[in-house]
Every structure is written in structure tokens, then in C-alpha cells.
Image (cartoon, rainbow, N blue to C red):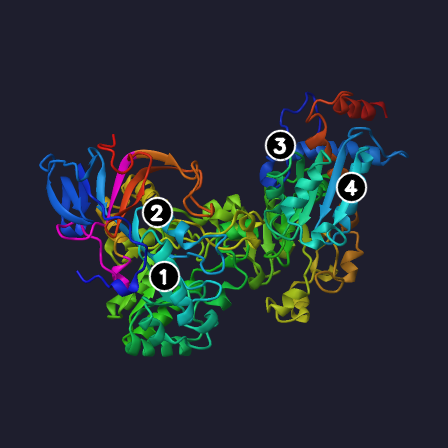
């Protein structure tokens, strides 16, 4: 692990987490180090620290989500925050309330943070302009999903020690993937060499300008230390991005036969078994998919903590309290 | 000059009586680029003389224009007045006020209103409203196809008789080559330039910005340049075959400029416009995800911008059109993908071009003035000129004055300006349109007062 905090790190992360571009390498390391300390808390019987006691976290989800929404909720609760979950079904969002009006309404409850997932690029950034709360992007359209990239970096760093020089392939529908974009940015920042691979119709023009390489064939997949597989969405067939799932699977499905020993396998979930991944690969020792899910909670705790704890002077000194709580364990 | 009175409409103001003294007068067509006194009597340019040669009298308002410029006023061939149907975005009063504030003495309005200007009744009502509200003369393009649906021609001849300047489905392309061909053929009967918004919907898809490195980074669906350029090439071929007169609206890409150049070489009767925003901004600014930068065609790459500047400099692109496209605040205050396309541009056109292109030495001032004044003549309107006996259509500008765009609000009803917040050089201080003062800034004291500054 890179973390041997001799002095308090000087890099603070900003008030919001909208994009991986908000974080330099030192800030990413800081979040991952913090997540390590929370991983230790997660191993305790009572998995709670009082860092955000009395503060409110609003989870505002305009898109279906299992992993991200539940892990944000759990993360906030383990930091002792009060949590409000709002999903578009059943909320006034369904009655045509604008995003701005919804956010301003929720802001009147004085939340410390708003976690937002929305189907449109830039939604989180807009929200940050409308609320005094810290805003965390939990996925904005096809743009970014920064906490996913952080938990992926955390998972890899735990397994490999460091990401410098690691060859990572991202395979699948890169064009429509916010996970791909945030991961290209985060993992290259951490020193990895990233290659994206997928059908030519699903690799955006000029994607190399993000700092990765691109290819349309799995021919050189053995070069990868890590194979990161993206979800292949069924609706892509209707738009003729690929002619059929059969042909897609034939060319791009990652199975044990296509992996060499020692390669690691990742996937952001949910998996389409038999499409982008074969069942034998999912259940193999190469797969880190379960570790990714576990990392989701501690990394999101770290993000909430870094953004919120100590961000405002609290009467009880919430930041110190949390640290003290950790040390006491 | 033949003023086609039938095809522009406004509420004429009181004929101006002005002595603008010691102004730097620049009119490239008249080959004037020197300090002069300009006397306007009864709305006409009565006299031009060396600075200090014309004596003020009590019958005229005297304006000391030392260190200021006088240009022929601009004509905008591409404006959305949003009337009828979307008056909350703009109406004829506010749209023409914005035009006058930007130095425009005439404009051409687009027919993608609600209802669409696709029949004579709508045109008549617009003519009537313009005669009541318009501060500068307004000409109208009627739709090529009914409801802009691309399937049935409008009654083009009747619309021409009722005063339409020409035709366009602007906002949408005429997707069917067969349909456009019929319109071009019909032009032989009814006249009227056919103006085209060039875009292949199959290539645009769900695109919301230029396809390139920035769209790849943002995860926004891209609109490839060839969505425009393939249609320019197709329609130039149709125009040539039918010997029709076609105008390409708001060209945005290098490939389109190449297609235009080829069409011209082959003798096609095609003209083209470029907007101030495509000439001064690129897709790089869309990284901000500010919906003010969402327009159609989209802001493109630097190489596209360079090609447009070169084409404006050479005259391959004939004129500047703003594509002034107002939208309400609540419509633009949404995520980028959901926001409507368009930026307002009348009030900032000159200052944006002057600041971003003339001052850095990319374009000469006389070229910018020539292109800003050329858009009407392409549709048969008179060209504003600074010459004795001409109706007064002129702009008084202070090139040394700087202002922050939007700091004092807008004359337009909308605020969706892609230059909002920028500091620009070159303030319009007065606009005389069709012989009457249509706009004066705070810098020029009001009627009757002697010597403004």
C-alpha cells in the first residue's frame, strides 16, 4: 500500500466530486488511503463511525441503480449521517418538476451532500450550481461515474499494490459507457496503461485523446494484466451498433478460454451472463467482481468523508471525532 | 438603388436629421476609409464632407463623432423572431430592438414559427404586426414545405406575391432530394432564393455537439461534420442541374467550405453565410457543458473555424448571418442534452467579430463590414451604402469602448447568448435604419440635445 501517512496529506479534494478531472493523483491516493481505513471499520462488528453525525445526505436517483444507490446509502449510514433516498418513481420528478426545482426544494433541508444520478451528461455539475451542498456525481448519462472508477482503482491497488505500468484493457461498448470514461481518466492518472477494445461502431472517434489506446480486436488481449469488461446493453442491437448479440459474443465475449493465467477480470455490474462474459469467467478466481462491490461501500464512505468531514466547522469537531474513533479501535 | 418596398416591413420612425461630424467613415463598397462629416436630412444622406466642413444648424442634431466610426448598417439574413407562437422567447418588437442595438438596419426572419409561416394568412399577419412593431425593416422567408415536414411544397408563388423574400425550412433540412428538386424547379416560376439548413438526419442521429475529441470526452453523441457537408454537396449538384439560386445557411465545417468552393468552381449559383459564433468559438468550450454553447450546427473544431475565417476573407462565404435563436431561461437551464439548440447573436455580432477576429489580425475590419452588410442583397434587398442621396442606413460605433456582454441585460427577450459575460470591444452607439434613428446607446444623448459628448 502506498499509504504511510507521516504527515497529514496536504491535498484536499474539492467541495464536489463531479468528474475524475476534479482529482489529481495525490487526491485519488488520499481517497483510496481513507477507504483503506474504512475497510478496517467494515471488518468490525459495529461498522459505524460518528463522522457525519447530525448531517444529512440526500441520494437523488433518476435512473435505476442497485449497487451505487445501496452502497451510497450504506456508506452514509456507516458514517452516522441521516439519509434521504429519492427515486424518480413516486417523487415529484414524475410530476414534471424540473431538476432545478427539485434540487432547490431538497436544498432547503440543508443537506451536507447531494448524491445524484441522472441520465443526462452534466446533470451533477448543474446541480452543484443550484445548491450549497456538496455534490457527488453517481453517474451522469454517458459522461462519468467517478466513484465507480475510484472503487475500481481501490480494488486493483489492493490486489496489485500499485497501478504504475499495469496494462488494463477495457472491453465492450465504450461509446455509451460512463464507467469507461471515468476509468480511463482515473487509471491513467494512477500510472496504468489503458487500452479500449470493442466493435468499431462503439469506439468513439478520437477517444485516444483521453490518454488511452484503442483497438477493435481481442487479438492482443494477452498483453493485458487486467481485463475490464463493460456491460453490453441490449438496446444497442436495435440501433445497429452491432448486428446481433451472437456476433458480439463471438468476437468480444471474455471467457476463460480467452484469458491467460494470472490475468484479472473486472466488471462494473450488472453482468449479462453469456453476452459480454461467459459464466466460467464470472465464477473464476480471476474475477474481482465481488471485491469491486465490497469496495463500493468503503470508497463511497471515503468520498463522503473527504468532502464533508471538516468541510465546515462543526461544534463537536466531527472530523477529529471520526479519526479518534478509528484510532481507538 | 431599387428598394423593394414590398418585401420588407416596419413601422417607420421620424426621418432623422443628424450631423455626425469628424467620424471615421468606412464603407468598403464606396471605397471610403477616412474622416468625414455626414449630414442626414429627412432620413437621407444629404452631404458628405471633410471633417469640420459641414456646419451644424438648429434643424439637425449634432453628434461629435471624433474617434468614432461610421459604417453602413448591417443586414442579418438569418434571424428567429419566434413570432407567431413563441412570443415569450422573442417578438417582433424585441427582436428588431435587438437588431437595432447590434447595428442592423434590416433583417430576414425565419419561418419555423408556430404556426409555421407556410401560408399566406400567416405571412399577412406577420406583415401587419411588423408594420406596427418592427423598429427596422423585416423581410420574411416562407417555408419550402408545409409544416417543415419535407413532404409537400408550400404555395410558393402565392407566398411570393404576398411578400415572401424567399424560402427555407431552416431548423430542418429538406431531407428528400426529390422534394428539394421540385422546389428548385418551381423557383423558375416564382423566384425567391431558396435557403438551406444542411444536415443529414441519419448522420446527425441523436447528436448534440460536434463529433470529435470533446464529444468523446464528455460522452455526448456527436454530429459529424459530414452530416452538413454531404448535404451541401448534394444540394449544390441539384442547384447546378436546375440552374437554381440557392443559399447555404450557417456553414460550420471545413468539408462544407470545400463543397461550396467546388460548387462555385463549377458555376453553381450558390451563396453562403457563416455565423459569428462559428467564426469565433470551437467545440472546446462545450467542455463547460453550458447550454449557451449548444447550437445547430454545433460549434466545431479549430480547423473548421480556420476554414470559415479563410472563406469569409476570400469572399467564398458571402455574408455573416447571426442565426439569432432566442430561448427562455427555463428552457436552457437543463442538462446539455435536453436544452434546445440556439444562441442569440444580434446584439453581439459586430463586437464579437471585431474583438475575436479584427483585433487579433485574423480579418480586416473592412472585410467584416462588407460581410455584415451583404446578407440582404443576396435575397434582393438593397445594400446599405454611405453615399449622397442614399437612405440613411448607418451605424455609429466606438471601437475603443469595451463592455461586458449581458451586464446591462439584453434588448432581446432572451438571454441565451454564447458570449454572455465576455468583455468585448466595439460598442454600437447609434443605428439609423431606413432613415430613422432605431437605436441609441446611453453614450449618445437624446433627440434634440446638441453634441452628445
Magenta residues, start to end: B375-400
Q: Residue furthest right?
A: A45
Q: Which residue is mark 3?
A: A14
Which chain does tag 3 point to?
A
10 Å crowding of disc 1: few (<14), some (14-19), many (20+): many
State which mark lies toward you, 2 or 1: 2
- Mark 4–mark 3 distance (CA, rounded to whole Å): 23 Å
Q: At which x and y percent is residue A208?
A: 52, 51
- Mark 1–mark 3 distance (CA, rounded to whole Å): 44 Å
Q: What residue is drawn where x is 55% and y is 62%?
A: A200
In the rendered image, residue B351 lying in the magenta stretch gets the answer no
Does residue B21 appear left or right of residue A187 in this picture? left
A173 over B167 or under it: above or below: above
A198 over B349 or under it: above or below: below
Q: Which residue is mark 1?
A: B249
Q: Which mark is residue B349?
A: 2
Q: Which quadrant of the view contains residue B120?
A: bottom left
Which chain does tag 4 point to?
A
- Mark 4–mark 1 distance (CA, rounded to whole Å): 50 Å
If you read the primary sequence from the N terminus, does the residue marked by circle 2 or circle 1 appear first?
1
Amino acid at each position: 500500500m502506498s499509504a504511510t501517512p507521516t504527515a497529514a496529506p496536504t491535498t484536499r479534494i474539492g467541495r464536489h466530486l463531479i468528474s475524475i478531472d476534479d482529482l489529481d493523483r495525490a487526491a485519488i491516493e488520499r481517497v483510496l488511503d481513507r477507504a483503506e481505513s474504512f475497510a478496517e471499520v467494515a471488518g468490525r462488528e459495529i461498522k459505524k463511525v460518528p463522522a457525519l453525525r447530525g448531517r444529512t445526505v440526500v441520494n437523488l436517483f433518476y435512473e435505476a441503480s442497485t449497487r451505487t444507490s445501496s452502497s451510497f446509502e450504506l456508506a452514509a449510514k456507516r458514517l452516522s449521517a441521516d439519509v434521504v433516498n429519492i427515486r424518480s418513481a413516486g417523487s415529484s420528478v414524475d410530476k414534471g418538476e424540473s431538476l432545478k426545482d427539485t434540487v432547490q426544494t431538497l436544498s432547503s433541508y440543508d443537506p451536507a451532500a447531494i448524491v445524484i444520478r441522472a441520465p443526462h451528461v452534466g446533470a451533477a455539475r448543474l446541480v452543484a450550481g443550484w445548491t450549497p451542498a456538496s455534490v457527488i456525481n453517481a453517474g451522469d448519462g454517458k459522461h462519468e461515474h467517478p466513484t465507480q472508477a475510484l472503487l475500481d482503482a481501490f480494488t486493483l491497488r489492493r490486489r496489485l499494490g500499485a497501478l504504475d505500468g499495469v496494462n488494463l484493457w477495457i472491453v465492450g461498448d465504450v461509446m455509451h459507457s460512463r464507467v469507461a470514461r471515468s476509468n480511463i481518466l482515473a487509471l491513467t492518472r494512477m500510472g496504468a496503461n489503458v487500452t479500449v477494445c470493442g466493435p468499431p461502431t462503439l469506439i468513439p472517434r478520437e477517444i485516444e485523446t483521453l490518454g488511452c489506446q484503442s483497438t477493435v480486436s481481442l487479438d492482443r488481449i494477452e498483453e493485458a494484466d487486467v481485463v475490464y469488461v463493460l456491460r453490453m446493453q441490449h438496446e444497442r442491437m436495435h440501433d445497429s451498433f452491432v448486428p446481433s448479440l451472437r456476433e458480439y459474443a463471438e468476437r468480444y465475449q471474455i471467457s476463460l478460454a480467452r484469458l491467460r493465467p494470472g490475468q484479472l477480470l473486472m466488471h462494473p455490474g450488472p453482468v449479462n451472463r453469456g453476452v459480454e462474459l461467459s459464466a466460467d469467467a464470472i465464477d473464476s478466481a480471476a474475477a474481482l467482481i465481488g471485491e469491486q462491490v465490497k469496495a463500493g461501500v468503503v470508497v463511497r464512505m471515503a468520498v463522503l468523508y473527504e468532502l464533508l468531514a471538516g468541510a465546515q466547522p462543526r461544534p463537536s469537531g466531527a472530523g477529529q471525532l471520526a479519526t479518534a474513533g478509528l484510532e481507538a479501535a | 438603388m431599387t428598394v423593394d418596398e414590398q418585401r420588407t416591413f416596419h413601422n417607420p420612425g421620424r426621418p432623422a436629421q443628424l450631423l455626425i461630424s469628424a467620424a471615421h467613415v468606412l464603407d468598403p463598397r464606396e471605397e471610403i476609409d477616412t474622416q468625414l462629416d455626414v449630414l442626414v436630412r429627412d432620413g437621407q444622406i444629404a452631404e458628405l464632407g471633410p471633417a469640420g466642413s459641414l456646419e451644424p444648424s438648429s434643424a439637425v442634431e449634432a453628434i461629435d463623432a471624433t474617434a468614432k466610426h461610421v459604417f453602413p448598417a448591417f443586414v442579418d439574413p438569418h434571424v428567429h423572431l419566434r413570432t407567431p407562437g413563441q412570443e415569450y422567447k422573442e417578438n417582433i418588437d424585441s427582436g428588431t430592438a435587438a437588431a437595432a442595438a447590434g447595428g442592423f438596419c434590416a433583417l430576414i426572419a425565419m419561418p419555423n414559427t408556430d404556426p409555421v409561416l407556410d401560408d399566406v394568412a400567416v405571412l399577412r399577419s406577420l406583415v401587419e404586426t411588423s408594420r406596427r412593431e418592427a423598429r427596422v425593416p423585416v423581410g420574411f422567408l416562407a417555408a419550402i414545405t408545409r409544416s417543415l415536414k419535407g413532404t409537400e411544397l408550400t404555395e410558393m408563388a402565392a407566398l411570393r406575391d404576398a411578400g415572401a423574400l424567399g424560402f427555407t425550412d431552416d431548423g430542418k433540412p429538406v431531407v428528400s432530394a426529390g422534394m428539394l428538386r421540385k422546389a428548385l424547379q418551381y423557383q423558375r416560376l416564382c423566384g425567391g432564393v431558396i435557403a438551406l439548413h444542411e444536415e443529414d438526419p441519419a448522420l446527425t442521429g441523436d447528436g448534440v455537439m460536434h463529433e470529435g475529441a470533446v464529444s468523446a470526452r464528455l460522452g455526448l453523441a456527436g454530429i459529424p461534420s459530414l452530416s452538413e457537408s454531404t448535404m451541401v454537396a448534394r444540394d449544390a449538384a441539384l442547384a447546378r442541374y436546375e440552374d437554381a439560386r440557392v443559399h447555404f445557411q450557417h456553414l460550420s465545417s471545413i468539408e462544407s467550405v470545400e463543397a461550396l468552393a467546388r460548387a462555385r468552381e463549377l458555376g453553381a449559383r450558390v451563396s453562403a453565410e457563416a455565423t459569428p459564433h462559428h467564426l469565433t468559438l470551437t467545440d472546446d468550450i462545450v467542455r463547460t457543458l453550458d447550454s449557451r454553447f449548444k447550437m445547430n450546427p454545433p460549434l466545431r473544431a479549430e480547423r473548421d473555424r480556420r476554414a470559415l475565417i479563410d472563406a469569409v476573407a476570400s469572399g467564398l462565404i458571402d455574408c455573416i448571418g447571426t442565426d439569432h435563436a432566442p430561448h427562455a431561461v427555463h428552457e436552457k437551464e437543463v442538462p446539455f442534452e435536453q436544452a434546445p439548440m440556439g444562441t442569440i447573436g444580434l446584439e453581439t455580432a459586430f463586437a464579437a467579430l471585431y474583438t475575436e477576429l479584427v483585433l487579433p489580425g485574423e480579418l480586416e475590419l473592412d472585410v467584416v463590414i462588407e460581410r455584415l452588410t451583404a446578407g440582404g442583397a443576396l435575397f434582393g434587398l438593397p445594400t446599405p451604402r454611405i453615399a449622397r442621396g442614399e437612405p440613411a442606413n448607418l451605424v455609429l460605433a466606438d471601437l475603443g469602448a469595451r463592455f461586458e456582454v449581458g451586464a446591462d441585460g439584453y434588448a432581446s427577450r432572451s438571454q441565451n447568448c454564447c458570449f454572455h459575460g465576455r468583455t468585448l470591444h466595439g460598442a454600437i452607439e447609434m443605428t439609423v435604419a431606413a432613415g430613422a434613428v432605431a437605436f441609441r446607446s446611453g453614450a449618445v444623448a437624446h433627440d434634440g440635445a446638441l453634441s452628445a459628448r
